[in-house]
Structures are given as C-alpha cells and as structure tokens.
Amino acid sequence: MKAWVLEKQGKVETKPLIKKEIPVSEVRKNEIRIKIKATGICRTDLHEIEGDLPLHKKPVIPGHQIVGIVDEIGKEVTSFKEGELAGAAWLYSSCGSCKFCVSGRENLCPDTKFTGWDVDGGYTEFIVIDADFAYHLGENHSFAEQVPFMCAGITGYRGYRLAEIKKGEKLGLFGFGPTAAFVLQIAKAKDIECFVATRSEHNQKSAKELKADWVGDYDDKFPVKLDAAIFYPPAGELISYVLSLLEPGGKLILSPIYMSPIEIKDYTGLLWMERNIKSVANITRKDGIEFLKIADELKLKSRVETYNFDDIPETLIKVSKGEIDGTAVVELDSSNLS
C-alpha cells in the first residue's frame, strides 16, 4: 500500500514526508482493518511533522482522522462485519487496567497510544486497529463530511460534556473554528444560549450562520454573564477576561493542547465563589460513541475542503498558512493513488 511517511521532522515547506510503498498490516484476532476512504489533516499533525511534538515512533505515518470501510476482521471480532463503515480517531489504545481506565477516564491512562503518533496513522490506504477502539459511522454524511467528526467533533464534545451546561443556561465559546462549530450546533439543539467571541471576521460570519445568539470580538462589550465557557485559542493572557464573565459556580473549560502563560491576579474577583477551571485532555471512547450518534441524528454540518492523496505535502503547507476553510480532507480512491 502507498503511504506518506515521516522519517525526519522539518518545516512543511521543505516537504519532509516521503511517499513509499509499504506492506499491508496483518489483522490479529481482536482487530479490524479499515480501507481508508478519507482522512484529515490536523494542526496536531503539523506540530508532529515540524518538531513541536517529539516523535514517539520513527518512522511514522501521521494522521488521526480516519473514515472508511471494514476490509477484514479478526477471528474474535463480533462488533464489526466486513463492508461496514468504520472510523479511527486520536485514541488508538489504552491499558484497560489502570485506575483511570477502570473509572472511565482512559484519556488519562499513562499507557495510551495515539493514532499517527505512537502508531501509524491515516496518510495511507489501510489502518489496522483493535475493534474496541474503532467507531461505527452513521449514514447521514459522506466520508469527507465525517472526517472532522473524528477529531474536532469528538474533542469538542468532550469539552461540552465537561462544561456540564444545561437547557436554558448560557454558554460562551471563545475562538471559533471547526471544534467550536460542532459545539455550537449541539448546544443550540439543546436550547442552550450561545455567545461567541472571535477576532476573525470570517469565523464571526460562520458563527452567525449557525445561529449563535451573539457574536462579537474580544473588545466588544459582552452582553451577559455565563454559566460556562469553552476556550480554544492558546492565548493565556485572555483567561482573566473570560473568568470575569462567569457567574458564581461557573466553569471554564480550556481546550488547547498548549497555552501561553496564565496569570490571575484577582483571586477574589475571578476565582472565588466556586468558579473552576478544567482542561480537556484527549478523548474517551464514550465521547466518540455519544458524539457520533448525536452527529448522525442532528445531521451536524461540517465544513471541509477536499484534496487528493498525492497532494498531501502541498495541503500541509496550506494548513500551516491558515488557507483552509474548515478541515482539509484527503480523499482516497484509485484515481489519486499514483
């Protein structure tokens, strides 16, 4: 099978990925093999390729937003059949026995393995994964439309769950990209008022199209106090501002994987009255199962731009420059696998 392989990290402008022919992995008794129909390019892939994240496997095939068709199943697999739609996401496996796994917090397991980082990912034609860590896909979206579900969608849903927001309450979304767009759609379907702050005029327009109750810039006067807020940009200097908008008992959920320094000088005004801060770390299978069910039932909208398999190096450059409207999705078929 053909694959884009990272052997040495470097800026995407230098095109460090190498296209190779590699053998198709065999399927063990508890695994399935997915013939990949579409895969996504994420900014986390950029961090790995360019060296912001250390390599856990070398060489490695990046990519962790994977959808396709079950091509083969192991002899002990009962949860999937050949020909069914299936997907793989960031969480590839966990130990299953530590205190985090047995308490439903496998996202915190110290022995987790992540797709496209610890094991080969989606920039190829097939992936083999334990059937218990693969996802059933719905029928109401195309392969390309379901690709962002596997990263932005599931991660966004985890932040939404941690916010514990209820019908009739007010949710703030700070920063607005694909992840926040999924959260906004779910929240509005559950009669939760949503208020979006983002500097991007394009993203402000997108939030308005998805029926946010208020959309503005960080410099605009915020119209309400919030029961919960989910924060997406890695801009630690804005945290005090967001805390100032929370009601007593309000929750601030931090979604970025890294953050510039946070300084909270006014404890009494910003953190007292049981306001609390929690970060989002990875995902659990429960997050994925619940989100994909919601996405199919609500027919959530996803914004994608599609590219060919052979164009992955050039597409990575476009992603790094912020030239993608939504999620960059690579579609795989015989016509673009030269």
Image (tube, grey):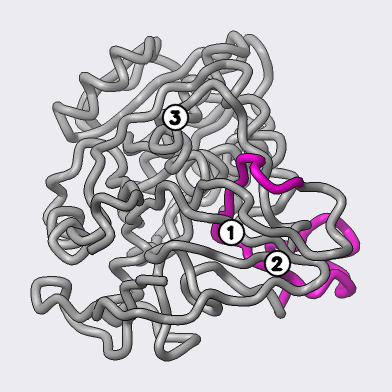
Q: Position of residue 67 (x, y in %)?
A: 51, 47
Task: Report how far apart the C-alphas of labels 2 and 1 lie in the structure.
Answer: 8 Å
For the N terminus, the quadrant is: bottom left
Image x and y of residue 78, in percent: 87, 51
Q: Residue at 26%, 22% (x, y): give it.
A: 206
Percent across and percent down for residue 174 are 37, 36
Residue that numbered label 3 is attached to: 142
Q: Quadrant of residue 210?
A: top left
Residue 162 shows up from this direction: no
Say which amino acid is labelled 3.
Ser
> Which element carries disc 2, helix, strand or loop?
helix
Q: Is residue 171 above or below residue 282?
A: above
Magenta segment boundaries in residue numbering: 81-110
* The quadrant where residue 177 appears: top left
Residue behind mark 2 = 108
Q: Which mark is residue 259?
A: none
Task: Evaluate if marks 1 and 3 touch, with contact meaning CB atoms under 8 Å apart.
Answer: no
Q: CA distance from mark 1 to mark 3?
A: 25 Å
Identify the image quadrant of residue 245.
top left
Indicate which disc, 1 or 3, sits on the residue closer to the N terminus.
3
Disc 1 versus disc 3: nearer the observer: 3
Q: Amino acid at mark 1?
A: Asn
The residue tagged with tag 3: helix, strand or loop?
loop
Residue positioned 33% across, 64% down in the render: 260
Say if the magenta span includes residue 332.
no
